[in-house]
C-alpha cells in the first residue's frame, strides 16, 4: 500500500535517458554504451526500482511461469515432485502455479484453461499412481511433462520410476543378508505398481535360485490388510523368514500382525516396504527398511525436461528414474 | 506447439473493427454498440481466441495471481490451507504461485522478491506451527495474510485456530460419555499449541467439577512418547478411564501402550487426539476420535480476507476459526 510504485519512467528521468534506452539498459538488450547502461542501473538501484515481470514477459514472449497440476489431495506423491521441480526451475527464476484437481477431470480442464490464459511456458502433471493417464485436454500450445503417472500417448514426455528395479533391489538385499524364504504381501491385483513389483520380485528370486514362498498376497493398501495377511501367511508358511511388502503402510500392518502371532522382528522375519514415507516407516516397530521411489528426483528431471522443451522443443518419450533402498532395523541380519 | 497463436489483431480483422474496438468489446469496457460487441465476441469464438491474462493485467493493474508461501515440507498443514484458499480464490479465477521455503529464511526472502517481481496481488503465508512468526521481509507493497501461524505484528492480518476451544470440546465429549478420570498426554512444554490445549483441558474439567488425573505429560510429538507415557500413566494412575492426547500421533502410541499393558480400548480407557490426520487416526486401533483443526476453513478465510484486502485495503487483526470433533470408535462409551 504505501505510495506509488517506482516505474521505468522515473528511472529514465533520473538517468537522463529515454524510456526506451532505460528499458534496453535494464534488459541487457540493444546497442548501448556501457556508461549509459551503468547510469541507468545505478538510477534503478537508487530508486529501489523492481522491474515488472509482467512487462518483461511481453518483450521476451516467456512468462517464466509454469503450471503444476497435482491430483493427490494429501500431497504424498505430488509434494516431493513439486520440491524437485522447484530445484530444477531455479528457485524462483521460474515459479509454479500449483493447481490441485483432486482427481476431478472437470477441475483439470478448468485449471488448464486458466493456466493457458496466463500464458504459462509449460505444464507439469504430477500423478499419484503409476497407471498411464489420458493426455491433458486443451493444452496443445505449451509443452507438457507427465511426472510419475505417464501419459498414455507415447509421443508425450513422461518421467516414471523403475518400480520393478526397486523390487529387485529389495529382494537382493534380503537374500544378501541371509534370508531364503521370502513372501510378498502387496496391494490390489490390477495396479501397475503392484504388477511391476511382483515381476521384479520373481526376477530377483530366480536370479538367486530361489522361489517365492507361496503366491503373492494381493489385498488393499492398508495396515489392516497387512495384519490379516501376516496372520494367514504365518499359519500357511511358518518357514517364512522375510516379507517384501508392496507399501510401507502394508509393511507396518505385517510387522504388527507377525509380532502379535509370536514372531520376533527382525530376528525371525525381516521386512522391507516401499515408499519411504517417513511417518509410517519411522513409526513402524521395528523401523522399516524400504524402497524410496525418488519422487523428488522425478520432479527434478521433469522440471529439467520442461525447461528444455520450452527452449528447444518437444522432448518426447519415457524417461526413467531409479529407486534407492533405505535400510533401517527391520531387515537387520538375524 | 503447432502454429502461431490467434491474436487480437486477427479477431479485429475478422470482425471488421479496429484493434482498440476489439479490445474494448472483449473487456466489456468503453461505449460500444451491442451489435459491435457481439460481432467481436463471435469472431473471437470462431477463431478460438484465448485472451491473454498478461495483457489484461496491464489494463486492470491486477494480475489475478497470489503467492502462497508454505513452510512445512510434508504439506500436512499447508496443503489443506492451499485447498481452502483455492476454494476462496474461485478455482482459477485467481491462481496461486506456491513456494515452499522449507523453513529457510533465505529461501523465503528469495521467493518474496520473486513474487513481488511478478506483481502478485497478494500473499498468503501458511505456517506449520501456531507460534507467532516474524512478518515477511520485503513485501510491503501487497497485502499479506498469515494462516495458522499468526504474525507477531498485531497490525498484520492473521487467521488462527482456537486450539483451547478445541481442547474444551474434546474434554466435554469425554465427560458427556461418562468418563471421570481424564489424563492429558501431549507434546513439548514450550509450544503455543501445547499451552493452549492444556489451558482448554483444565477449563473444561473445572466446568465439569473434575480435576485432571495427575499433571499433563509433556514429551515429544511421537508414537514412541505416547507408548512410554501410557505405560507410566497406567502404573501411576490405574484409575484413568480417558486420555486426551495433544496429537493423533501421540494418541496412536498411547493406544498401543495401553493395550500392551492390558487395558481394553475403549471399554477401559477412551482416547481423543488432535489433528484428524487420516493416515494415523484411521489406522489407530481402535480408530481415533480427534479434534479437527479445520485448516481448510483457515485457508478459505485467509483467501477471502486476502481478496478483500486487495480490493478494499488492509484487514488488520486476528481472525479465529473454530475446531470440530470427529468421533470414531476410540471414545465410545464403555
Image (cartoon, coloured by chain):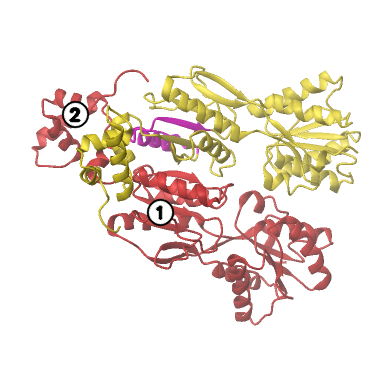
Chain colours: A yellow, B red
Label ID, residue B138: 1
On-image quarter of the C terminus of chain B: bottom right
Q: Nearer the viewer, residue A186 or A299?
A: A299
Tell me the number on the disc at residue A86: none
What segment is highlighted magenta in the picture? A103-126
Residue reaching furthest front? A35
Q: Residues within 10 Å of mark 1 (few under 14, many from 20)?
A: few
Left or right: where A306 falls relative to B26: right
**Residue A213 to residue B28: above or below:** above
Q: Give the labeled residue for mark 2.
A: B42
Whether residue B219 is visible: yes
Q: Nearer the viewer, residue A248 or B168?
A: A248
- For residue B48, what is the image quadrant? top left
Quarter holding the N terminus of chain B? top left
Name the residue furthest bottom: B209
Q: Nearer the viewer, mark 1 or mark 2?
A: 1
Estimate the x, y position of residue B268 in percent, counting from the top left.
77, 66
Q: Is residue B108 left or right of residue B204?
A: left
Amino acid at each position: 500500500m504505501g505510495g506509488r510504485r517506482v516505474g521505468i519512467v522515473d528511472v529514465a528521468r533520473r538517468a537522463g535517458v529515454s524510456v526506451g534506452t532505460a528499458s534496453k539498459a535494464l534488459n541487457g538488450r540493444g546497442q548501448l554504451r556501457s556508461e549509459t547502461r551503468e547510469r541507468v542501473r545505478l538510477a534503478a538501484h537508487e530508486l529501489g526500482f523492481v522491474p515488472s515481470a509482467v512487462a518483461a514477459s511481453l518483450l521476451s514472449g516467456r512468462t517464466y511461469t509454469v503450471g503444476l497440476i497435482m491430483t493427490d489431495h494429501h500431497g504424498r506423491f505430488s509434494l516431493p515432485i513439486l520440491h524437485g521441480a522447484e530445484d530444477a526451475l531455479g528457485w524462483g527464476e521460474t515459479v509454479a502455479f500449483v493447481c490441485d484437481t483432486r482427481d476431478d477431470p472437470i477441475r483439470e480442464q478448468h485449471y488448464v484453461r486458466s493456466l493457458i490464459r496466463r500464458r504459462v511456458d509449460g505444464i507439469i502433471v504430477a500423478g499419484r499412481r503409476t497407471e498411464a493417464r489420458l493426455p491433458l485436454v486443451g493444452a496443445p500450445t505449451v509443452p507438457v511433462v507427465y511426472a510419475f503417472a505417464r501419459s498414455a500417448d507415447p509421443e508425450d514426455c513422461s518421467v516414471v520410476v523403475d518400480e520393478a528395479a526397486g523390487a529387485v533391489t529389495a529382494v537382493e538385499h534380503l537374500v544378501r543378508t541371509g534370508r531364503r524364504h521370502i513372501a510378498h504381501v502387496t496391494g490390489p491385483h490390477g495396479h501397475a505398481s503392484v504388477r511391476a513389483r511382483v515381476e521384479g520380485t520373481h526376477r530377483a528370486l530366480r536370479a538367486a535360485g530361489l522361489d517365492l514362498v507361496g503366491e503373492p498376497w494381493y489385498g488393499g493398501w492398508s495396515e489392516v490388510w497387512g495384519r490379516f495377511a501376516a496372520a494367514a501367511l504365518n499359519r500357511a508358511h511358518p518357514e517364512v523368514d522375510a516379507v517384501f511388502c508392496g507399501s510401507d503402510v502394508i509393511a507396518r500392518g505385517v510387522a504388527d500382525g507377525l509380532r502379535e502371532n509370536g514372531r520376533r522382528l527382525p530376528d525371525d522375519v525381516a521386512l522391507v516396504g516401499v515408499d519411504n514415507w517417513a511417518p509410517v516407516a519411522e513409526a513402524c516397530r521395528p523401523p522399516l527398511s524400504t524402497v524410496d521411489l525418488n519422487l523428488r528426483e522425478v520432479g527434478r528431471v521433469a522440471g529439467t525436461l520442461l525447461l528444455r522443451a520450452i527452449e528447444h522443443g518437444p522432448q518426447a518419450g519415457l524417461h526413467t528414474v531409479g529407486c534407492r533402498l533405505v535400510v533401517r532395523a527391520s531387515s537387520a541380519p538375524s
